[in-house]
Image (spheres, rainbow, N blue to C red):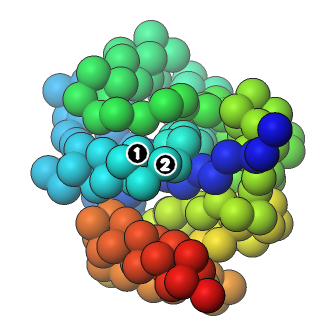
Amino acid sequence: MNSAKAVFLDRDGVLTVPEFRDGRSFAPRRLENFVIYTDAADAVLALKNAGFIVVVVTNQPDVGAGLVAQSVVEAMHDRLRREIAIDDIEVCFETHNQATERRKPGTGMMKDSARKWNLDLVKSYLVGDRRSDVQAGVSAGCTTIFIDRGYMEENRPTAQTATVQSLGEAVRWILQRERLMVAI
C-alpha cells in the first residue's frame, strides 16, 4: 500500500487569528476570541481536493500551565472540525519546560499522524508561522512553508523551503510544486 501525502498545519497564525501582546502572537484563551481566517476553509478544501490528508499540529501550552481549561481548547477544535475540512488534530498541552518529543519543535505529533494515517513524511508539507513549526517540519523530513505574519519575534526561521504571507499563498505554492513534480 502506498503512503499518503499530508499537509500539516499549525493552528494559531495559520488557520486562526492569534491574539497579540507587545507585538508577539499568542493563542486565544477564550472561545469568543477564536477567529478562523477567512481563507482557511477554501485553502484546506483545495488541499483535500488535491488528495492531501490535512492534519492540524498545535502546541497549546496554556492548558499545561493552567491558564486555559482543556475543554475550551476542545471546543475550539470542535469548531475547526465543523467549519474546515481537516482530517485530524494533534495537540500538545505541554509547556516549554515540560516539553517532550510531541511538543514542536519535536516531531512527535507528525510521527503519530504518520502512523495513524500511513503518511510519507518526506512527501508531506508543514505550514507554520513560527520557528518551532519550521524546525519540526525540517526534523520530520517535510517540505516547510513559513507564513510570515510580521511578528516581532527574535528567532525567525531560516530553514524553510518557502516563505509566504498567507495560508492561501502557501496552498498555491504547494499545488504548483506538486504540478511541477508530476510533470517531471
Residue 130 screen position, x and y as percent = 53, 67
User: Residue at coordinates 44% horizontally, 17% vertically from top-left?
Assistant: 74
Residue under pointer 2: 51
Res. 134 visible in picture? yes
Quarter of the figure that contains the N terminus = top right
User: Is 76 on the left-hand or right-hand side of 100?
Assistant: left
User: Is 120 on the left-hand or right-hand side of 174?
Assistant: right
Residue 32 is labelled as none
Towards the viewer: 84 or 104 = 84
Figure label count: 2
User: Residue at coordinates 51% horizontally, 16% vertically from top-left?
Assistant: 70
For label 1, the crowd category at 10 Å Cα-Cα, with few meaning under 14, some 14 to 19 and many 20 or more, is some
Residue 33 screen position, x and y as percent = 20, 35
Residue 39 screen position, x and y as percent = 19, 55
Q: Amino acid at mark 1?
A: Lys
Towards the viewer: 165 or 32 = 165
Cα separation, mark 2 vs mark 1, equals: 5 Å
User: Residue at coordinates 68% horizontally, 85% vertically from top-left?
Assistant: 159
User: Is 156 on the left-hand or right-hand side of 101?
Assistant: left
Residue 48 is labelled as 1
